[in-house]
Amino acid sequence: MAAAIRAVSEPRTFTVDSLLVRVFASDADLATAAAVEASETIRAAVRAAGRATVMFASGDSQLPFLEGLAQQPDVPWSSVVAFHMDEYLGMPSSHPASFRRYMHQRVVAPLRPAEFHDLDGDAGDPEAEADRYAGLLREHPLDLCCLGMGENGHLAFNDPEVADFHDPLDVKVVELDDRSRRQQVGEGHFPSIAAVPRRAITVTIPALLRARHVLAIVPEVRKAQPVRDALDGPVAEACPASILRRHAHAILLLDEPSASLLAPR
């Protein structure tokens, strides 16, 4: 039997341009609210079209959300097609830091969607793999994109140096910046920055934001600076997450620590 769904305190809510922002008292409240929002969006898509297509992010910040999503009742996972958004180049799925491994442990095994499409980081031809994955995304338009925000403001692995709000590609090979690589060390996935791959395959920003609904799940005080840059600074590739302010159906969910540097509202 699924665990009982916990009650959530009322969030502080405001908008920045087109972006709805909700600030919760705790990470636990944020995760529960995100799980409820995602499950309702999935149910609505399945009612309307018979299936839902959802993209998920990896990362420590997403774990409470994914755990909460698995507890939501009556989600029609047998009608869900799922994707993920990035993978290190040259990394086998057996590696402890592989995002494919994360997805199979945290999404495929507990949720059991009808289909899950892997982005193959150790494909022999990375450019061809990017084209293949882009083709799958064209075949399966996203109903919901559940994403996080990097410590450098990245969305997926679109770091500031490679982010392009008008990218002609839907999936591409990128060079990772040092701050992005240090974040992976800080989260305990690699012993040193030298061990972190320098390249990855990522879904691009236009492809992420082509989703009908975007749910940005951003807890933790270490995200306070990129959150401030995204909401209080200009909309610019220097902070890729700032583009969320231009999406008509995006919601940014914060907790008090991640919202702690925002200008008063």
Image (cartoon, rainbow, N blue to C red):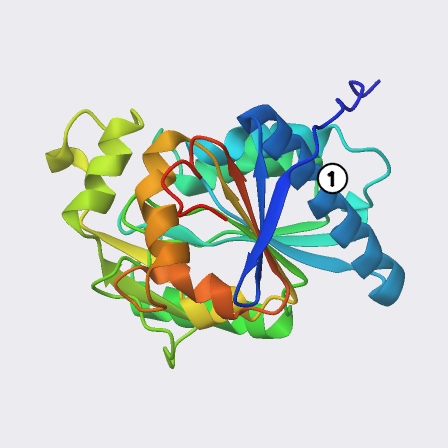
**Number of callouts in the render?**
1
Residue 154 visible within the image: no
Quarter of the view holding residue 109:
top right
Q: Is residue 262 left or right of residue 175?
A: right
- The residue type indicated by label 1 comes to Val
Quarter of the view holding residue 250:
bottom right
Residue pointed to by mark 1: 36
Q: Is residue 174 left or right of residue 56?
A: left
> Residue 96 location, x and y as percent?
36, 28
Quarter of the view holding residue 77:
top right
Residue 246 to residue 83: above or below: below
Under tag 1, what secondary structure? helix
Residue 84 to residue 260: above or below: below
Residue at left 38%, top 33%? 94
> Residue 203 location, x and y as percent?
42, 62
Residue at left 21%, top 42%? 181
